[in-house]
Amino acid sequence: MGATVAELVRAVEAADSKGAMVVAVHHLAAAQDVAAIPTLITVLGYNNPGAAVAAVDGLVALGQDAVPALLEQIDGYNYGARAWAIRAVALIGDPRALPVLLETAKGDFALSVRRAAARGLGTIDWAKLPTDQAPSSQQEVLDVLIGAAQDPEWVVRYAAMAALEGLAKALAEPETQKPPILVCLQQAFHHDETPAVQARACKALEALGELVDAMN
């Protein structure tokens, strides 16, 4: 018989080295039990990237059940924990995280966090949002991603290209919202200073069936 969640939590609390912490968090995450959520979120605030990655994996596996507690953490003062929490909610794709992802993609000072937020805007599960709310929310996302496509850091622009592809495939009003996406992708394809961003824009255009037009 395997360890209970309470025992796995105690193992995390008793870990006396960074390595032992990583192992203990992996075991707790593998339990995939909602009772583990508070401890997994606490781990995000430790100065232990390996344990934080394991905790994020566990929280993402729990999906929407973890979102309310993660959003509370994002409002906290521990910047490291906030950054990891944003990564987690971005990977989960729950629309309840839209306000924080939009705000973070627009202006967080850490490029890795802006990148995570921008990428997360392209993987929102729009089916979880009321149909009448989708067009306006998608327009907000589009506006922020067009801004992210001009970010000074190429990794954020790269994430924006991927997110624009994801958004284009999910649009509630493609006839009005898809053209600006294609224009943004085409501009990046032709003019971005970083080859990796140009390549990602090219991939997005190809996936959307627009590569031939972009090359004309």
Image (cartoon, rainbow, N blue to C red):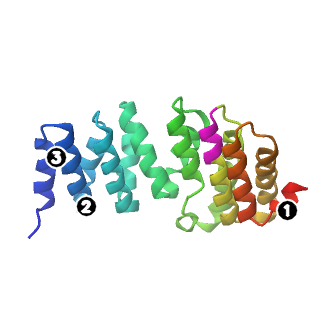
Q: Is residue 176 left or right of residue 108?
A: right
* SS label for mark 2: helix
Q: Are marks 3 and 2 in contact (CB under 8 Å)?
A: no
Q: From the viewer's side, name the closer residue of 207 and 183.
A: 207
The prevailing secondary structure element of the residues shown in magenta is helix
Q: Which residue is mark 3?
A: 12
Q: CA distance from mark 3 to mark 1?
A: 54 Å
**Disc 2 marks which amino acid?**
Ala
Residue at the disc numbered 1 = 212
- Reading the image, the residue beneath label 2 is 30
Q: Indicate the quadrant containing the C terminus: top left, top right, bottom left or bottom right.
A: bottom right
SS assignment at label 1: helix
* Residue 189, horizontal then vertical, whole percent: 77, 48
| Amino acid type at image mark 3 | Val
Of marks 3 and 1, the one in the foreground:
1
Q: Furthest-front residue in view?
A: 195
Extreme-bottom residue of the structure: 1
Near mark 2 (Cα within 10 A), the count class, few <14, some 14-19 or many ≥20, is some
The image quarter containing residue 138 is bottom right
Q: Position of residue 45 (x, y in %)?
A: 30, 36
Q: Tell me which amino acid carries mark 1.
A: Val
CA separation, marks 1 and 2? 45 Å
Look at the picture and state if 194 lies above or below 216: above
Q: Earlier in the sequence, mark 3 or mark 2?
A: 3
Q: Which residues are magenta?
A: 153-159
Numbered label attached to residue 178: none
Indicate left or right for 18 with 74 as reference. left
Q: Out of 50 and 135, give the one closest to the viewer.
A: 50
Q: Is residue 158 magenta?
A: yes
